[in-house]
Image: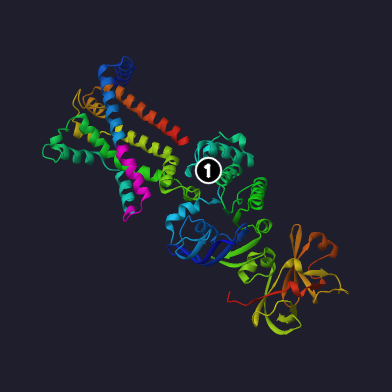
Amino acid sequence: MAIIEAHGIRKSYGSLLALHDVDLTVGEGEILALIGPSGSGKSTLLRVLDLIEPADEGRLSVFGIEVASERGSWLDLRRRMGMLFQRPIVFNASVYDNVAMGLRYRRASGEEIDRRVKEALEAVGLSRYIKSRATDLSGGEQQRVALSRVLVTDPEILFLDEPTANLDPTSTATIEEIVMRLNREAGMTVLISTHDLAQGQRLAHRVGVMIEGTIAQTGASSDVFRAPKDRRIARFVGVQNIIPGRVVSRTEGLTTVEAGGRQILSATPPPADEVEIVIRGEDVSLHRREPMHEEAENLFPAMVTRIEPAAPFVNVTISCGCDLVALVTARRGDALGLREGMGVWISLQAKAVHLIPLTGH
Amino acid sequence: MVNGNPIIEGFIEAIELIIALDPQVVEITIRSLYVSLTATFFAALIALPIGAFIYFYDFRGKHAVVSLLQTLYALPTVIVGLVMFLMLSNIGPFGFLRLLYTPGGMIVTQTVLIIPLLMGLTVSALSGIDRDKRYTITALGASRLQTIMTIISEARFAVMAGVLLGFGRAIAEVGSVMIVGGNIRGATRVLTTAITLNTSMANYSLSIALGIILLSVALGVNIALSLVQRR
């Protein structure tokens, strides 16, 4: 069942358009990661969904309630959700009073507050700081205070806005672990925004890529990584090779594309006549001589033009009519005896060659 | 060689006056503190809620109001004195209150003088609560009233610092209390006006004694301010 449904969300600040045409459905108990570059509108979208700020246009329903016609119920709806922000935010009061804030707003009894605050601080490993002034703690500790402040209110939907962007690995791991456990055990729905692709992959059941104020693609993280829908998404998910080409023919499930005078086979149905070929560097294999039993559909000789270390990998630029970047492990690079100007063979599976329509930019 | 130097002699005499708790020095100091503390109290009573209102409610011309307040920080005190004198004098609209040349009139004048400062500093103290903190309060499920209370409580030290600055300006001020109070001995003479008068009469020891006290009050305010700001 969908717990959040948004259609055509639009939001601007003065002349700055922050969100446009956002369509998003989030299922109950799902972890969805919004990934995208800084300034792509991830934080704004989370605030709109958490009913902190109203959208200018569009339809939004949360817990099955259309929010536009129910302004009076926003406070009640908001109290069923919680949000953790990128910058650790604590108030100038004790750790205890910080964590108790949400419960006090909900007029919980003193006893209940006491019990739940202590439990929550136990869970994030900060019991010993219960009486300390929250502003005296380190950034990582403050963020854990902020997390327990959200969690004591038992939110049904948890929004995390780049929650670990400024944190050390230990605090990051603690926070990720707590979030995963709450999702698994309590069925909490989680929306997390991050510019860390690996974090998105690690935590989320599904990712949405935000580019320039809208959700450009949603799907399993492997789909987004292997089959980005357009050039901007491809760039963001770290595709090294985006090469313009032209579709020549389509036979037996394989599309032939011509690029730089060379024909490349792709398993993607042609999206247009003029296309761009998207190839991840790690899918390009290098060989010293022509491989005899290679099953890859694409196999051709090429020349190494540039070698660039990117530990523990090496970026190898090879020329074969067009320039391709291959990502090989440093060890494999040594074994091949790579040097600039040497001839190599490259193999590339048709499945690893993704096609997108050629766009203006 | 120091013998006969009126400054050195005045300084020594001034210390004696303070240590001996000279009745005139004590009386002037107490009146000064009474007038300025009362004025600060009433100014805070008026300026803090209005400052909070200006911050929390959006209305047309809000920006202009805040700019105006900041301009009024530097309001020349003699102008305030002149306007208040005209208001409180027999020819003015509030002449019937008979406040001219009384401590009451001085309190009203100092209150008017520091209200813009307190209002402006309250607005900026509340504005010091950044956007992310306000989002956090909203996200935690605070109602409108709970939001306002949390923001005020979070800005409490900055607001207190503003009140202390207002008191500092009130007690150090000379022009308007001179005009409205009239510097009448035993009635409306305060630290600043007494220093002005005694200096012009070459009565340096009393001036220096009162100056030392005024400086100590200012120092005390500063110490309190830094304690508050360290929180």
Q: Spot the residue most to the right.
A: A292
Q: Residues within 10 Å of mark 1 (few under 14, many from 20)?
A: many
Q: Amino acid at mark 1?
A: Val
Please check the rendered image and state whether residue B53 is part of the magenta-colored stretch, yes or no.
yes
Specify whether residue A175 is in view: yes
Q: Circle 1 sits on which residue?
A: A90
**Tag 1, which secondary structure?**
loop
In the image, is A322 to the left or to the right of A145? Answer: right
- Per the picture, the main secondary structure of the magenta-coloured stretch is helix
Is residue B87 positioned above or below B5 on the image? below
Which one is nearer the viewer's eye here, A312 or B15? A312
In-front residue for pair A10/A337: A10
Residue at image location 59% in from the left, 35% down from the top: A129
Image quadrant where residue B215 sits: top left
Residue A191: x %, y % from top left = 59, 57
Residue A160 place in picture, x, y as percent: 58, 53
Residue B172: percent from left, percent from top = 30, 32
Location of the N terminus of chain A (image quadrant): bottom right
Residue range of the region highlighted in magenta in the rendering? B43-62
